[in-house]
Image (cartoon, rainbow, N blue to C red):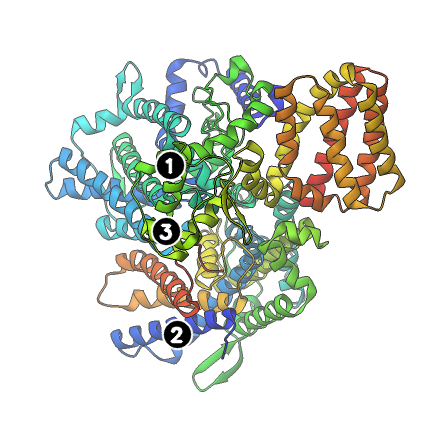
Amino acid sequence: MRIPLSTLRILVLLAVFVATVLFFASQIDGYLNARLFNRISGSVAVIALIAVGQAFVVLTRNIDLSIGSVVGCTAYFTGGILIAYPGLPPVLVPLLAMVIGALFGAVNGFLVARFRLPSIIVTLATLAIFRSILVQSSDGSSITTDRLPPWLPNFATQNAFAVGDLQIRWIVVISILVVLGAHLFLTRLRAGRQFYAIGSNPDAAAFAGINAGRTIFQAFVISGALAGLAGFMFLSRFGNITVVAGLGLELKSVGAVVVGGVNIFGGSGNVLGVLIGATLIDLIDTSLVRWELVSEFWREAVLGLLILLAVAADTVLIRRLLRRKPAGGTP
Amino acid sequence: MTALRSWEGFLFAVLILIYLVNAWNSPVFLTSGNQINMFQLSVEKIIVALVMTFVIINGEIDLSVASVMGLSACAFGWMFQQGVPAGGAVALALAIGFLCGAFNAFWIVGFGIPSLVVTLATMIAYRGFVRVLVEDRGIGNFPDWFDALGQKGLIGPVTLAILIFAVFAAIAVLILQRTAFGRKVYFIGANRAVAEYSGLDVRAVKARIFIASGVVSALAGLLFAARVGAVRGDIANGFELDIITMVLLGGVSIFGGGGHHVGHHPRDPDRAGPAQWHGACQYHRAYPDRRSGRASDPVSHGADDPRNRGAPDCEGSMKQPRLHLVKTLADPIGKKAVSELVVQRILDLVKTGHLSAGDKLPAERDLADQLDVSRPTVREALRALSILGVLEIRHGGGVYVTALNAEELLSPMDFFVSLNAQNMAELFDARIHFEPMLAGLAAERLTETALARLGTLVAAQVADPEDADLFHDTDVEFHKTILEASGNDFLSRFGKLLQLLGDQGRQAFQKRKSIRQQSVEDHQVILSALQAHDPAAAQRAMRQHMVNVRNALREVTGA
């Protein structure tokens, strides 16, 4: 039986994920309980969104380093608009956040696609520029929970349904729907396959009549819109938004994408893997705090090494299963 | 104006502008003390940017540099606090930098994991070790001599860090431009596969670069600690993005192999005040594909000196990688050793004249016996050499040494160029400078026979606008005829080389009718200028033609 590479990769990731859970369960008393699930699912909901957005960009051989700043900006601006117009219908608010995020994404996409600038340079610049816009326009003041309409902070803890003690929150449902939607879009639709085509061979894609510029632009807009939705959830979860909101999320999203098995040089990868990658990173991050063997100061050191080990294990396992030569990376 | 069109020229103009604005606004801006102060604020980052240039040219990235800076600084502080003498602590901190670099290299080279992933993880991990070491404390009160090294000038107002920068900068330029290692760095960045087939030990080069990156970052971290006089867990946090920005701003291609020059114009992106540009450290272009190998000051010569472009450089680029086949003989031999050894043995035989053009090699089985290696190894070596254009494998007819002429040796480059749209566009940049000149020469010398031939070719193109193959053949012939009429054998040969390169890619994009139509129109204009024996008009027409093709190419491929 031949298992497709993408499925194989997800199975390997799931195995690593289960191994991680079992490891922590053996180390920490009362580890496997509903609270762990509730805590992790809430934060994964936010990170999975930006990681999926990042995956779209990475598939096209680009990178979006400005994503953390976009999350911060949309959270802040959406909060600001809600404070000014508290009567806005709740359904419109996430859409508004997505539009704001998409506008930031469009700036990146325009610069990369129209002027053919390397995305790492463009988004490195917009990382700083978007953050400065936030600092300038906020004048250093913060958004606080008590100034927001009460439905918003409550939204993050509202359950869609519950299974026993496991609470499935709305934000988790939305996030999973987005991931599934992105997965179907990328795997089933012509418009989705174009992202892979551009990433795996830009010249061939161009000769096949795919408009590279437009596809890359779309990738950045999608990345921005998903970062905007994440910004909305961020606002809902934390309520208090300062100018440093979302700082460092760009690297976390890249981390989730690469652990999730998306080829950093574009053209291959799977957003279901990205979801598992995001969950794995968050799980490790959360669990290390509770692991008594290591002090909390060890958290980052261990996290970095574990990411490395996860990727190395994935690479080695996939290679062994495919009996490929060690050089050249995985396809 | 040509100087302004290059990236270096543009940066230099911006630099001058910023200097003028600042000098206008502040009377002390131009004093040497202020200049040194400004430079000092980011000198540690600039030192790391020097080594990052190598990493990026090589087609990799090192995100962990700032964490290594922090780790070495904090390890120094912690050891000093534990009673280790400051001198010993400095040495140990540098050793830690070495280990960090080696650890990165282990995963990147040993496992083949992309460096972006590895150094992203170690960025977090090394920063984590910093927190383990100093937790949330600050450590200071270093010995006076240590602080003085960072804060006082050694020679006048010039501090140790600036001296180290100057020395490192000089060494970096020398290594990149004058040593085999430097050329390998470029070559591997430009095309790793070809580099491997050429017998370069890609893994050893990459490992050395990452280790160097670790050591230099550790040194920069110590300099930073000495200048600030204390260390904390978040020291140098986030510097990696500034450092990468400096390198990219200096025009090094993030996709590797395309560093216009190591001479970045370091600039501190997070300082809004007086811009931290520094013009004193511009090195000359060390472009792998059209390198002149000549270091000169961009101010006096013009950064984009047309003399650096065009044919002679093109020729240089073809030779550069090949020269390393010789130099790698002394290099340590890695895992793929056996087939590489076979490649080298055969190349040696060719170089020493034991095998010459047209010679037939023994059969594969005999070669395997004679060299005492397996047949697949021989086959791999022969294939590598045939890709390089040294051998020709005739089906059923054995293996022969090729005529070893330039065109055949160029064909791997041709393959490479055909794959890379950016290179294609640059190739046309070269032709934009070159072909008009030859068209001008040809206008004076074209014989009536040649003119008639050109007329026939263009007429054929006009007559059958749908036939892409016909267009391609007549197009090649058209340009070749003009090149040959220039009356200078060297010039026409260079011109033909430029034309030969990228032929496959060009053929693909000539399949578009609009592109053919534009070219046919251009050809008609060129032809009438040539018929009038008007050099200036011929130059203009040819130039316009090349520009049109290049722009069309850019539009199609996005390069």
Image height check: is B543 above or below B58? above
Dot 3 corresponds to which residue? B108
> Viewer-proximal residue, A236 or A69?
A69
**A88 horizontally vs A6: left or right:** right
Q: Amino acid at mark 2?
A: Ala
* Tag nearer the camera, 1 or 3: 1
Measuring from the top left, give residue A191's x and y in whole percent.
Answer: 69, 62
For the residue labelled by badge 3, is the local secondary structure a helix, a strand or a loop? helix
Residue at mark 1 to residue at mark 3: CA–CA distance: 32 Å
Q: Which mark is residue B348?
A: 1
Q: Which mark is residue A15?
A: 2
The subunit carrying tag 3 is B
Residue drawn where x is 65% and y is 46% of the image? A113
For the residue labelled by badge 2, is the local secondary structure a helix, a strand or a loop? helix
Q: Amino acid at mark 1?
A: Asp
Q: Which mark is residue B318?
A: none
> Viewer-proximal residue, A134 or A199?
A199
Q: Amino acid at mark 3?
A: Ile
Q: Respond whether the residues carrying marks 2 and 1 are from the same subunit.
A: no
Residue B124 seen by the camera: no
Residue at mark 2 to residue at mark 1: CA–CA distance: 51 Å
Disc 1 residue crowd, few under 14, some 14–19, many 20+, Cα 10 Å: some
